[in-house]
Image (spheres, rainbow, N blue to C red):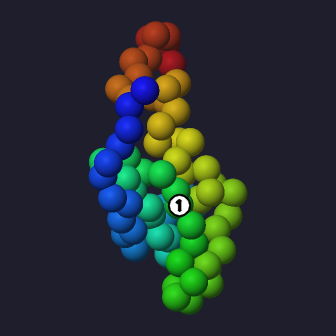
Amino acid sequence: MSTNTDTQTTVKSTCYMCYNACGIIVHKQGDKLVNIEGDPDNPQNYGRLCSKGRSGLQALYNPDRVTTPLRRTNPEK
């Protein structure tokens, strides 16, 4: 069992999971992101996030995500 002794910090940023570009507050612990929430001071979203923005951590840490360019296997297309 490992324990992380790094302090948790918050960073204001912008979510680009959809076309709205909402303001977000990202909570990180060490080098790992632990939470994403809407920025209540941002006039674009007033602290709310869509479902794509809320799933940002899952997209980042999904072990099945595409991490390399794909190659076409059908040369006729």
- Depth check, front residue: 15 or 38: 38
Position in image of residue 7 (x %, y %):
33, 58
Q: Is residue 21 above or below residue 74?
A: below
Task: Report the residue at 44% width, 17% height from top.
Answer: 72
Name the residue that disc number 1 marks.
Answer: 36
Kind of residue at badge 1: Ile
Q: Residue at x 37, y 69 (%)?
A: 11
Quarter residue 13 falls in? bottom left
Closer-to-camera residue (12/29): 29
Report if residue 27 is visible in the image.
Answer: yes
Quadrant for the N terminus in the image: top left
At 50% from the left edge and 75% from the top edge, which residue is drawn? 23
The picture quadrant where one finds residue 47 is bottom right
Q: Is residue 73 above or below residue 16?
A: above
In the depicted structure, whether residue 46 falls above or below residue 65: below
**Which type of secondary structure does the marked residue at label 1 adopt?**
strand
The image position of residue 5, as x and y in percent, is 32, 48
Quadrant position of residue 27: bottom left
Q: Position of residue 3 (x, y in %)?
A: 38, 38
Residue 65: give x, y in percent of width and height.
Answer: 49, 30
Question: Can see residue 44?
Answer: no
Mark 1 nearby-residue class (10 Å; few <14, some 14–19, many ≥20): many
